[in-house]
Image: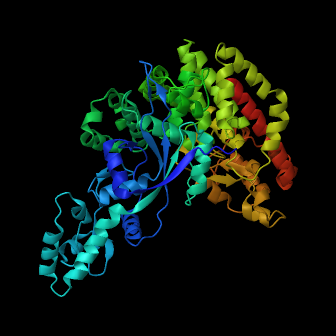
Amino acid sequence: MIIQKFSVNQHPINHILSWIQGGEIAIPEIQRPFVWSSTKVRNFIDSLFNGYPTGYIILWQNPAVRLKDGTKSKGKKILIDGQQRIASLMTALLGKEVVDKNYEKKRIIIAFNPKESVFEVANSIIFKDKQWIPDISEIFSPNFSVLAKLEEYSFYNPEIPKEQILKAIDALKSIINIPVGMIELSSDISIDQVTEIFIRINSSGVTLNEADFAMSKIAVDEKYGGNLLRKAIDYFCHLAVKPEDYQTFKERDKEFAQSEYFQKMTWLKDDKDDLYDPSYTDVLRVAFTSKFERGRLQDLVALLSGRDFETKENREEIAESTFKILKEGVLEFMNETNFKRLTMILRSAGFIDSSLITSQNSVNFAYILFLKLRHHNFPPFIIESTVRKWFVMSILKGRYTSSTESAFNYDIIRMKNNPLEYINNTLREELPDSFWDVTLVQELDKSTSAIPEFKVFLAAQVKMKDKGFLSRDITVEDLITIKGDLHHIFPVDYLKKNGFPSPSRYNQVANLVYSQSEINIAIGNKSPVVYFNILKEQCQTKIPKIGGITELEMLRSNLEANCIPVEILTNHELLYDYETFLRERRKLIAKKVKDYFKML
């Protein structure tokens, strides 16, 4: 027998709006910022006016929670889909402000022309044109008088029949009586089922994840301060990217500016570092996993509802405790010392730029590990070395690039009691000699510089303070910092003319180096034999033609630092045999990365 876990009903718009204003349906000030354009709001109102379908609103009933006095409370319904439409109704019909994607409050004013029965976004021209009612929210005001408006409009537009004007205004007012489809999901339906229903119904193809549900759960809570916690997460993530908005937040949200959350993020106003700009999902992952030692955000959603995983019922004290502990986790995440120490550790591993980081979740788990080791009171140098090694391992092995939550859960559970023992055992298992000598060499046989193995190689060059290819003074770190370009050791034009026309061959990562643009220009499309002869000659004449190196020993050191076989200075076969050169350089890159890992 099929058990239906949802109901589908039709409710007039005015009922829905009254439920929202009465608090039965929870739409927090910040749930998802309002992202619809003014034109889209106009089109939505026009669709309602003309009787076109506008889709369903989806609500998810909070589960029953056993209160401390033994009674049960269901709480508010959570809006899962339809916020943009409801916010459009509230700003256009009720004159309310919405919070846009920049967290600024604004009104979207829609105008109506009774003569043509058309809508437009209000502007200065429309406000002066007497054929328009410039703001339709006045029509829906409790003090609105149809007769007074009819007389006023007719006075300025005597050529339009009053019957036509009255009919148009009545049609506009009747929008609030239009029924809207509402899907109400049962409280015992799983997140996966909610997601599946959402995807199947939502024609725009938007998907939801556990972080979205968690943020909605947090946002609708006022009893335990979830609404402020949600705002703190949103503001922190925004300021991490746009610190210049600090003063705007402080002035426009004076109440929140007095909260402990805002005081904890004050340091962001002067922060220009963009190595780690977290999203709300990142904040939740780190805060939840580090404090609850669980990796699945689905569990957070359940705990926020007060879920007792043993008795399978929801209890108020569990919800209260969850909000308290999660708040602690978020404040630890936002802590200036913690955050800056994490980025310092990443930079000390050579990851000086976000372009070198191929997995945000590896950064997230590095933060979790840092916080966990700190809670265990390990010495700072142990924490730093351990976090560096685990981070690099997770990047090289793609540990958190797929099945992220399962991987988080697996690791955090196993490092619960003795984290260092688990970490050291895992590093040995994941990175045996065969990985460095065989697997890594094979993984470098790729034609895209975006692969994590090559990014780690560049981080190794930064860590070892290597000079750019054929540079006397400019380091790889300098070139990455100024957003320099990778160049080809065997020039592309030369390879195309010598049997390698495919990008998959001439763009091999083993053919790429960071080099100054002027050096690359000086090399041009010269064959490696030709320009290496020039390099050797300038070491004899002391007259630089390509770069500034004029000492043979310095040239050898530069080639070694860039993992280029030094034998090419005496054995020209490597300069003629491109495939052999690639094989030899891959081995040298792998060896350098292995030596680098031991340094961490």
Residue drawn at 57 percent across, 36 percent down: 188
Taking the image as shown, residue 599 lies to the left or right of residue 39, namely: right
Taking the image as shown, residue 307 lies to the left or right of residue 394, namely: left
Q: Tell me, what colour scheme is on the image?
A: rainbow
Q: Nearer the viewer, residue 513 or 51?
A: 51
The residue positioned farthest toward the bottom in the image shown: 159
Looking at the image, residue 586 lies above or below residue 529: above
Asked where in the image residue 46 lies, by quadrant, the reply is: bottom left
The count of marks equals 0
Q: Measured from the top left, where is residue 516 in percent x and y?
A: 59, 51
Q: Nearer the viewer, residue 221 or 567?
A: 221
Taking the image as shown, residue 270 lies to the left or right of residue 135, namely: right
Q: Nearer the viewer, residue 564 or 287?
A: 287
Q: Measured from the top left, where is residue 468 in percent x and y?
A: 63, 44
Asked where in the image residue 521 lies, by quadrant, the reply is: bottom right
Looking at the image, residue 52 lies above or below residue 309: below
Could you tell me which quadrant the N terminus lies in?
A: top right
Could you tell me which quadrant the C terminus lies in?
A: top right
Looking at the image, residue 274 lies above or below residue 101: above
Q: Measured from the top left, where is residue 486 in percent x and y?
A: 64, 52
Does any portion of residue 240 appear in the rendered image?
Answer: no
Does any portion of residue 192 appear in the rendered image?
Answer: yes
Q: Nearer the viewer, residue 551 or 414?
A: 414
Residue drawn at 33 percent across, 32 percent down: 262
Looking at the image, residue 598 lies above or below residue 130: above
Q: Measured from the top left, where is residue 312 in percent x and y?
A: 60, 25
